[in-house]
Image (cartoon, rainbow, N blue to C red):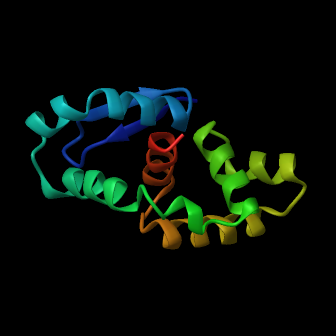
């Protein structure tokens, strides 16, 4: 099953086999996307990533960093739970904490932020 990142009008911005590939594609297309979709929501993602680059990831615990690394690899919550030998609910709790600490609203934004700071 492929992953699609779509704009609300139905434009496919990126399509790939993993979240990591989608994030890399979005980063590569960044300038073109800003020209085609000059809507604040896309720019907010850019601003958030730059604003958080210095200290956002440093605020994460070791376990949260592990989970975020798995997210950038395109793993589902169920797969992450299996690999780390924890429950899916625990993965969801960690993801909520990650999103809050990084000031992002979803796993795509978190993955993009993480990939930018590798």
- In the image, residue 73 sits, relative to residue 93, either above or below, namely above
Give percent across and percent down for residue 4: 42, 35
Name the image quarter holding residue 64: bottom right
Q: How many marks?
A: 0
Give percent across and percent down for residue 29: 27, 28
Name the image quarter holding residue 98: bottom right
Q: Residue at x 15, y 39 (%)?
A: 34
Q: Residue at x 81, y 54 (%)?
A: 81
Give percent across and percent down for residue 116: 44, 41
- Tell me the quarter of the image containing the C terminus: top right
Q: Nearer the viewer, residue 31 or 9?
A: 31
The reply, left or right, for residue 92 in relation to residue 17 is right
Q: Residue at x 47, y 65 (%)?
A: 102
* Name of the residue lying farthest toward the front: 54
The reply, left or right, for residue 72 in relation to residue 83 is left
* Name of the residue lying farthest toward the right: 85
- Tell me the quarter of the image containing the N terminus: top right
- In the image, residue 84 sits, relative to residue 17, either above or below, namely below
The reply, left or right, for residue 42 in relation to residue 28 is left
- In the image, residue 90 sits, relative to residue 18, either above or below, namely below
Give percent across and percent down for residue 17: 55, 26
- In the image, residue 81 sits, relative to residue 74, either above or below, namely below
Q: Residue at x 32, y 27 (%)?
A: 28
């Amino acid at each position: 099953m492929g992953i699609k990142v779509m704009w609300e009008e139905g434009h496919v911005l990126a399509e790939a086999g993993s979240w990591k590939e989608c994030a890399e594609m979005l980063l590569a297309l960044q300038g073109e996307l800003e020209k085609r979709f000059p809507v604040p929501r896309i720019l907010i993602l850019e601003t958030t990533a730059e604003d958080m680059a210095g200290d956002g990831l440093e605020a994460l615990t070791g376990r949260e960093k592990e989970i975020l690394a798995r997210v950038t690899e395109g793993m589902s919550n169920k797969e992450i739970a299996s690999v780390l030998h924890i429950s899916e609910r625990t993965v969801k709790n960690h993801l909520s904490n990650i999103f809050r600490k990084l000031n992002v609203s979803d796993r795509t934004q978190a993955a993009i932020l993480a990939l930018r700071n590798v």
